Structures are given as structure tokens and as C-alpha cells.
Amino acid sequence: MADEADPNTAAAGFSAAVNGGGRTVQECQDMIRKSFRTPMVKFLREHLEKSGCSLGENFVKAVHCDKLISGGYVRGEGIMVCSNHMSIQDEVNQVVIHELIHAYDDCRAANLDWANCAHHACSEIRAGHLSGDCHYKRELLRGFMKIRGHEQDCVRRRVMKSMTANPYCSEAAARDAMEAVWDICYNDTKPFDRAP
């Protein structure tokens, strides 16, 4: 969840463990430009444009973040990537992909309300499932060794982590919202034909 408290500007993001180090804003901005050349980012940007949402030159920007988050999406402002929490190109790519899925959801749903726990949960489920955040290799690197069912467990864990940062959603409300929309949102793979 972004830092905004206004439900009209607040949007989705996701927390991540910080593994020390980090990059300068300029280094991270260069890494963002590299991410624009990856097939998944190109695909998502193209589909955002096709949906009528133009991405200005500064839609994705590197910033220094005081909070323990990797990045976020804010309606009307775009995507921020927390340079001081990024170490390698793959991390930047993942944040950009995850947040572009939130931007796509915001673009295609005229009535999306980030203060509504079910709406926020749905976009987090989709972003976690479609972005590759929960690929088994990433999970192993995080110390989660479960072989079967790891992907859905990971998505649920990461949805809850993001949802509990939403000032409009208590932990119980976040969990109830996630469970209520799980099947529909997990199986909604737009703009992909199937989950990548």
C-alpha cells in the first residue's frame, strides 16, 4: 500500500525484506530503463496503452523510500521503485512487473477503490500470481522450502503482507476479503491468456 491515506489516491504496493545495500536513485532509474526492454514489461506496457492508459515518460520512477517497501503504485502518479531497497536487476524487474499489473487493474476497472479491502485483495492476488513474485526459486531464496502448493501459499502470504499495510483493512478484514475473492481473482489472468 502506498503511503497515501486518501482512498482516491491510495493504491497498491508490496512490502519486501530488505537485504542491505541498495542503489542510488540514478542507478535504479537506469535499472528501470533496462526493465523496459524485458518481454514481460513490454507486454504489460503495451496492454496498458491498448486499454487507454498512457504511461508518461516518468510513470515509473526511482525514489528513496523511508518505509520497508520495494515500491508501489499510486493512481494519478504512477509507479515508484525504492532504489535504496534494490540490489540487482531482477528485483527491479519484479517490482516494475508487479506494479504494472496494479496499474493495469486500475486502468481497466473504472470503479476500483483501493480503500475497499476486496478490490485491493483482488489486485494483490493477481499481481502476486501473474508477476512471478512467487516462483519457486524466489521462494527458496526467501527460505520457504515447501515443494507442493508453494505458489498459492506465497501469494496468500504476500497479499496479507500488503493488505495489512492498508489503513482501511484490519488483518481480519484483509483475510476475509482475500478469501472471498480468491477464486475469481486468482483465475483472472488478463491481459495474459494464462498465468505466465
Image (cartoon, rainbow, N blue to C red):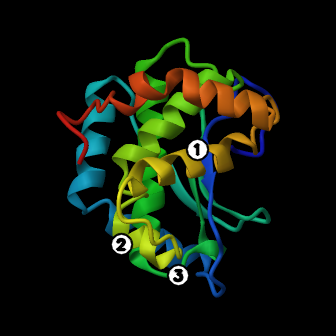
Q: Is residue 25 left or right of residue 170?
A: left
Q: Which of marks 1 and 3 is nearer the N terminus?
A: 3
Number of other residues with Cα within 10 Å of mark 1, as a class: few under 14, some 14 to 19, many 20 or more: many
- Residue 67 — which label? none
Residue shown at 61% from the left, 40% from the top:
12
- Residue 159 — which label? 1
Where does residue 61 sit, x and y in percent of width and height? 54, 58
Q: Earlier in the sequence, mark 2 or mark 1?
A: 2
Which quadrant of the figure has residue 187? top left
Where does residue 86 sit, x and y in percent of width and height? 56, 75
Where does residue 64 sit, x and y in percent of width and height? 70, 68
Residue mark closest to the camera, 3 vs 2: 2
Which residue type does callout 1 highlight? Val
Q: Helix, strand, or loop for circle 2?
A: helix
Number of other residues with Cα within 10 Å of mark 2, as a class: few under 14, some 14 to 19, many 20 or more: few
Q: Helix, strand, or loop for circle 1?
A: helix
35 versus 153 height, above or below: below
